[in-house]
Image: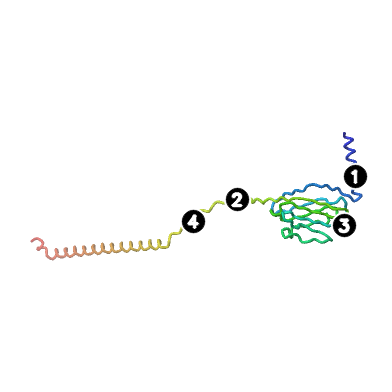
Amino acid sequence: MEGWTASSLLCLLAVRLFCGAAGVTECHDRALDIQAVEGSNVTVEWCFSSRANISISSLVIYCVFMDPEWKLFFHFYDMVEDPPHEQFSGRVQCDKDALRTGRVRFHVSRVQMSDSGQYRCRTVTGSGRKVKRFSLNITAAVDEPKPLTPEPEPEPEPEPESQGWLGLYAGLVLAAVAAVVLALCCSLYIHKWKLLKLLQEFQELHPEELHL
């Protein structure tokens, strides 16, 4: 079993070396179902020819987005790229070096939710044609939760200006009343003192009248 496995690997290696020397590359046709998040960049790549050193001057690539009305995704012929549909304007780039090796490699930047769907591409070379389908499934970006911040305490409401003036007026009135009461008390005391003094003087001048 081990000898058979070793011989199989040697045969496979010999085939690959032969293909490389002859200018032939491996080309596997696999389904392309690309998942991405909105706003990210994706790369779509597949093999359209097993031959290397392809002359892209005679290469034709025609890709559409089937949504359900077809929109031009990429069109290349006679070394010229036609403008794509406005939905993909400025967001699709094709690697020309990859085309020379028999591979289509698209770089799609800033993918959108509206880019989700099926795509169909047809490549035409001097040796034949090939049709490739792929799909994009773009999901919405999830916003990161923001850290919770404590709510600021409400500031005490300033007292209305009218209340301040009212307190000032009340204080002035009380001060005035206190001054009036104090003045009356002083006046009564002085008046009583004068009466007592007059009575004392009268007693000293007329003591006999007080004993009648």
Q: Quadrant of residue 184?
A: bottom left
Q: Secondary structure at mark 2?
A: loop
Along the polypeptide, which appears first: circle 3 or circle 1?
A: 1
- Dot 3 amino acid type: Ser
> Residue tagged by mark 2?
147
- Dot 1 amino acid type: Val
The image position of residue 82, as x and y in percent, is 78, 61
Along the polypeptide, which appears first: circle 2 or circle 1?
A: 1
The crowding category of the residue bearing disc 3, from other C-alpha atoms within 10 Å (few below 14, some 14 to 19, many at least 20), is few
Mark toward the viewer: 4 or 1:
1
Along the polypeptide, which appears first: circle 2 or circle 4?
A: 2
**As rendered, which of 93 and 132 lies closer to the eye?**
132
Task: Give the Cα separation between the discs numbered 3 and 1.
Answer: 25 Å
The crowding category of the residue bearing disc 1, from other C-alpha atoms within 10 Å (few below 14, some 14 to 19, many at least 20), is few
The crowding category of the residue bearing disc 2, from other C-alpha atoms within 10 Å (few below 14, some 14 to 19, many at least 20), is few
Q: Residue at x 70, y 51 (%)?
A: 138
Residue 15 disc label: 1
Q: Is residue 107 left or right of residue 158?
A: right
Quadrant placement of the N terminus: top right
Circles 3, 4 touching at the beta carbon (< 8 Å): no
Task: Give the Cα separation between the discs numbered 2 and 4.
Answer: 24 Å
**As rendered, which of 201 and 144 lies closer to the eye?**
144
Mark toward the viewer: 3 or 1:
3
Q: Is residue 70 left or right of residue 193?
A: right
> Residue tagged by mark 3?
55
The image position of residue 48, as x and y in percent, is 83, 51
